Image: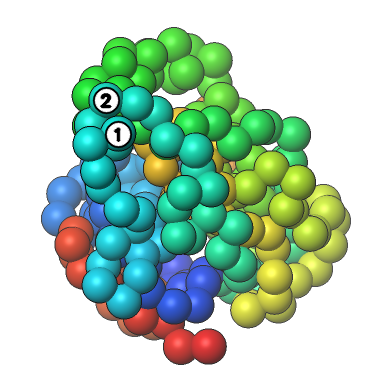
Amino acid sequence: MAEPIDLAYPFRGHWLVQNSPADRVPSHGTDLFATSYAIDFVPVDADGRSAHFGLASVFRPEPPERFRGFGRLLLAPLEGVVVAAHDGEPDHPAYRGLPSVGYALTQQRRARAGWPALAGNHVMIEIDRVVVALCHLQHGSVTVRQGQRVEAGEALGRCGNSGNSTEPHVHVQAMDSRDVGQADAVPVTFRGSLPRNGAVVDAPG
């Protein structure tokens, strides 16, 4: 296993941890697209809620704008060079309750469509032959371009619901190549540790 790359949290405020490799590997249930050590962060309020869950949430898809973290600022988790910046995918509805079942049935179709269909709008940063990707960014929010050098903490875009996403969140993964289809996953830590599923990270700022 490769040595972990230590990152800063790519956000400020309260974020709920999901699909953490601290709980299982592969964290997302597959080794495809170098996701073995990927981790998801869902923006939440001080009470740990991403959005009100009512009767409508059980039966219908919901606009992503209904979620408190939609549009929340995302930051570079490390210094490096931007090797990809994609910003052309729409933000689709969020799926909770019964709609999430139907959305899950379309998962294989998105996987067959490849990395862009899963990642949605994304930014990839490379340093020392390790590439870190942040995925599911808000349409029209990416503020960096390919070839640009960024510092840790620099604004990259905003939290969205593009790609393979059931509600607004950011997916973070590291790999050993820009070619996601051929890359091997690289473990990640954040400030020297790895939060477990259900933890709420409170990043200052």
16 lies left or right of 135: left
Residues packed near mark 1 inside 10 Å, few (<14), some (14 to 19) or many (20 plus): few
Residue shown at 74% from the left, 53% from the top: 142
Q: Check the image and report above or below for 11 versus 145.
A: below
User: Picture quarter containing residue 194?
Assistant: bottom left
Point out residue 82 in the picture as x, y percentages from the top left corner: 74, 57
**Quick one: SS at disc 2?**
helix
Q: Check the image and report above or below for 137 versus 189.
A: above
Q: Is residue 15 visible?
A: yes
Q: Which residue is mark 1?
A: 56
Residue shown at 64% from the left, 41% from the top: 121
Point out residue 162 in the picture as x, y percentages from the top left corner: 56, 37
Q: Which residue is mark 2?
A: 59
Residue shown at 21% from the left, 46% from the top: 25
Point out residue 113 in the picture as x, y percentages from the top left corner: 54, 15
Q: CA distance from mark 1 to mark 2?
A: 5 Å
Q: Furthest-bottom residue in view?
A: 204
Q: Is residue 1 visible?
A: no
